[in-house]
Image (cartoon, rainbow, N blue to C red):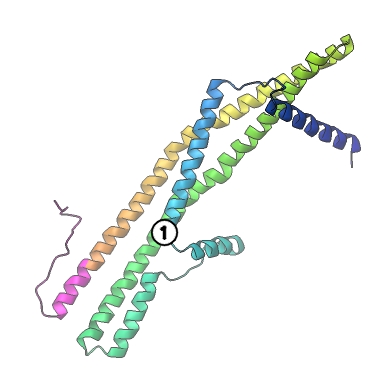
Amino acid sequence: MDLKKLAGTAGQYLTRAVQYTEEKLGNAEKTEFDSHYETLVAQSDNAKLWTEKLVAGVQAVVIPNPGNRVEDMLFEKLEKRRPNRLSNLEHLGLDMVQAGTEFGTGTAYGSALLKVGGAEQRLGLAERDFVGCSISDFMEPLQKFLDSDMKTIARERRILDNRRLDLDAAKSRLRKARSLDAQQAAEAELRRCQAEFDRQTEITKLLLEGVRSTQASHLKHLQAYVAAQAAYHHTAHTIMADLTRDLHSMAGEPPSPLPYSPTAPPH
């Protein structure tokens, strides 16, 4: 172990802690970031906040059961894939098919249960496709943005905060220097800290400025989510329209249209 390096690191942490404490107590000056940087930070924080809300919101829609969400997360970590569970619609469809078989195809109720059960299973498959597309085309890309881009920005912002503490600590040492040698050493340290602060400021600004450019890709992911949702509802409407027609036909009744058709919007 390099004890000298370890001691230097510990000393740096202590210096930052002292500087931070003095600032909080109002006993030390603090270098303020420029307004452009503060604006970028506010925009980045806003993007992070709303992206987290969107991911959580879509997750609540496509995986409403909190227990399933936890199970999915653990399963993905261990098996590197999502569990292939039946949806509630598919379970209902299976029960209806089994009930219809028990009651017999020779009964009106048994035949109807078989028809409805098959439709519920197809609805479940359509729902599963929608859930899968929502996760892969919307949730996962946005979560990747949070786990990659936003975490990188957070790390660089922490580094910049440390560079700022180092810079202000160097300014404080220069003000307190009395001998010529101490002043020269403090000035050299201040120049180094200022250069590192300026460099880290530019790095962090570049990353922050890139946040807005991600909206174009996020828009495409949003469009993919809407397309998947529209496809699901179109498929579901078709399944239910066919089922309604079949049930009326089995009962010897004239066909009755569904109360809403996507081709003829209600007034």
The residue where tag 1 is placed is 62
Q: Where residue 47 sits in the image (x, y, percent)?
A: 48, 38
Q: Quadrant of residue 87?
A: bottom left
Return the x and y of residue 51 as percentages of the image width and height.
Answer: 47, 43
- 147 left or right of 261? right
Q: Is residue 3 above or below residue 204?
A: below
Picture residue at 15% right of the left edge, 75% below the top? 248
Dot 1 amino acid type: Val
Quadrant of the image containing the N terminus: top right
Residue lying at 40% horizontally and 57% vertically, measured from the top left: 61
| Above or below: residue 30 compared with residue 48 | above
Give the residue at x 86% y 11%. 178
Using residue 245 as the reference point, say whether residue 74 is left or right of it.
right
Instruction: Look at the image and give the residue range highlighted in magenta.
Output: 241-267
Q: Is residue 137 at least partly visible in the picture?
A: no
Q: Position of residue 194 (x, y in %)?
A: 71, 19
The location of residue 127, given as percent across then percent down, is 36, 63
- In the image, residue 40 sits, relative to residue 100, either above or below, namely above
